[in-house]
Every structure is written in C-alpha cells, then in structure tokens.
Amino acid sequence: MKAISIALLQRVPLRAVLIDIIALAFIYSIPALSHMLSLPVYLIEPMRLMLIIAMVHSNKTNAYIIALTMPLFSYLVSGHPSVYKTLLISTELVLNVFVFYFIVGRIKHVFVAIFGGIVISKLVYYALKFGFISFALIGGSLVSTPLLIQLFTTLIYSIYLAWLFKRAI
C-alpha cells in the first residue's frame, strides 16, 4: 500500500496540487472578497481565471480536474450556484478546455485556440442556459454579465494565455 501511495504522489506534480488548492481557496473566498472590496468580483469570471491559470501553469489533466471540481466545490461549500447552474458552469469550463486543446493541437496558434475555446464554450453555455430557463429549471435573465465585459475578459485571458505559452516554448 505504501508503494502505491508513493507512486501516486510521484505522478502528481506539486505545481498542479498547489494550483488546485489556490483555485479552490479563491473560489471559496469570492463572496467575502466581493463584500470586502464592494466590487462584483464575479464579473471577472473567477472560475475561468483559475482555469486559465491551471492551463498555463499546470497540465491538461489538471485543467479538466479544475473545470469539473470548482463549480461543484462552490456548490458544496456555499450552496451557490444552484445544481443546474453548477452543471452549466462545469459543462462550459470542460468544453473550454476541450476546445482549446483541440484547436491548439490542429493549428498551433494559442491565442486563436483559447479565444475560440472561450467563445464556443460561452455559446454552448448560453444555448443550454436558454433551455434551462425555458423549462423553468433556473430563473433570471439569459445574460447576467454584460457582453462587453465578457468580451474584455475573454481578450485579456486569451492574451495572457498566449503570451505565457509563447514564453514557455
């Protein structure tokens, strides 16, 4: 048993574990940060920010783990977002990772891959959200964060990821 534990620990990079811990702590503290700073921190898409950081500073597997667990962790710790919204966000983030690695594997252009990944995952998110609203599974408006802010954060995250990937090559 000890040999299995040591073998597993050797396979898990310390950087990935640290990123996971930081991401979960950040997501856990978002409500407190928003209240303390009197700023709507959710507008910067903190889960996507943590996902981008995982994609740049960790590995593909860890990015998928972050995409799946952050919304679930947030739901389990704070009861927010709702179960359906948690499903929507997890789907969006996992799709974001998939599309990014799919595009970057084909055309090797990181900016296009991450920008495309974010846009495609957002389009799927909004299509699913429309369906969830139509079936009264969730309430609220279709677009809660202004599209201009979403475009701005998408550009910033895409530039950041492309710049750091370029530096790493």
Image: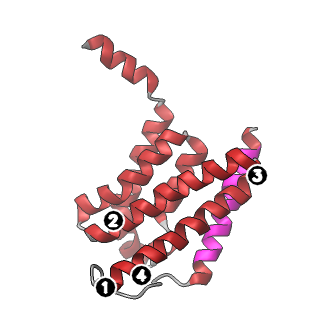
The reply to whether the C-beta atoms of the residues labelled 2 and 4 are less than 8 Å apart is no
| Other residues around mark 1 within 10 Å, as few (<14) / some (14–19) / many (≥20) | few
Task: Determine whether the residue tagged by mark 3 lies in a helix, strand or loop.
Answer: loop
Q: Which mark is residue 130?
A: 4
| Other residues around mark 2 within 10 Å, as few (<14) / some (14–19) / many (≥20) | many
Q: Residue at x 39, y 45 (%)?
A: 21
First to last magenta residue range: 150-166
Q: Residue at x 65, y 63 (%)?
A: 116
Instruction: Report the amino acid beneath label 4.
Output: Phe
**Separation (CA) of disc 1 from disc 4:** 10 Å
Question: Where residue 138 sits in the image (x, y, percent)?
Answer: 30, 80
Q: Residue furthest top?
A: 3
**Separation (CA) of disc 3 from disc 2:** 30 Å
Instruction: Report the amino acid beneath label 3.
Output: His
Residue that label 1 marks: 139
The C terminus lies in which quarter of the figure?
top right
Which badge, 1 or 3, is on the more N-terminal residue? 3
Instruction: Report the amino acid beneath label 1.
Output: Gly
Residue that label 3 marks: 109
Mark toward the viewer: 1 or 4: 4
